Every structure is written in structure tokens, then in C-alpha cells.
Amino acid sequence: VRVGIAVETVGQAGRPKPITGFQTHSTPVLMGQSERAELASDEYLPLTSILEGVVILKKNPEWEPEDVEMVAK
């Protein structure tokens, strides 16, 4: 989970990042009032569109771990 300061992205062109100055943590994560989070991988799917407050995740049935040997080549 990447946790950083929330950035307002309404009206911005393209696919802007919703957070800035992020740090990567393992779960569970305690976030501050002005912070927002994003998932670092597709292993889990959030049940909400914005990762603020309490967020419940479910396992992604279509997720497959990357093959480390194939990535290194």
C-alpha cells in the first residue's frame, strides 16, 4: 500500500496520481487525516473507489504473480 498526501485531481487531463510524496507500507496501515492510499499491486481489489478512511479489500481472482525469472531476462 502506498500512502501519501491527497491531491485533488478533478478536472486534470490524463491519469494524474491521487497522492504525492508517498511511502510504501505493508498492511494494516494507519493513515492521517489528509492522507490517501493506493494499492501497489493488483493482488487485492478495493470495494471503494477512493482509499480513504476504512477500506475493505477482496482477493483479486484474476491476479497471477509475476514470474521473477521472466522479468530478469
Image (cartoon, rainbow, N blue to C red):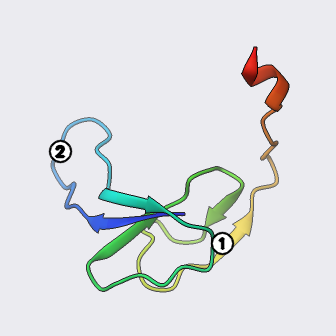
Three-letter code, disc 2:
Gln
Give 27 or 64, whichever is nearer the viewer.
Answer: 27
Residue 36 image offset from top left, x and y in percent: 36, 70
Residue 45 against residue 52 in the figure, above or below: above
Three-letter code, disc 1:
Leu
* CA–CA distance in space, label 1 to label 2: 27 Å
Which quarter shows the C terminus?
top right
> Residue 12: which disc?
2
Which quarter shows the N terminus?
bottom right
| Residue at screen point 74% across, 21% down | 72
| Residue at screen point 30% across, 57% down | 21
Classify mark 2: residues with Cα within 10 Å, few (<14), some (14-19) or many (20+): few
Q: Secondary structure at mark 1?
A: strand
Q: Using the rendered view, name the quadrant where residue 66 is placed.
A: top right
The single residue placed furthest to the top in the displayed view is 73
Mark 1 vs 2: CB contact within 8 A: no
Q: Secondary structure at mark 2?
A: loop
State the residue position of label 1. 57
Q: Is residue 59 left or right of residue 57?
A: right
Residue 51 against residue 73 in the figure, above or below: below
Give 28 or 38, whichever is nearer the viewer.
Answer: 28
Residue 49 image offset from top left, x and y in percent: 46, 65
Q: Using the rendered view, name the quadrant where residue 56 is placed.
A: bottom right
Task: Give the mark nearest the N terminus, 1 or 2.
Answer: 2
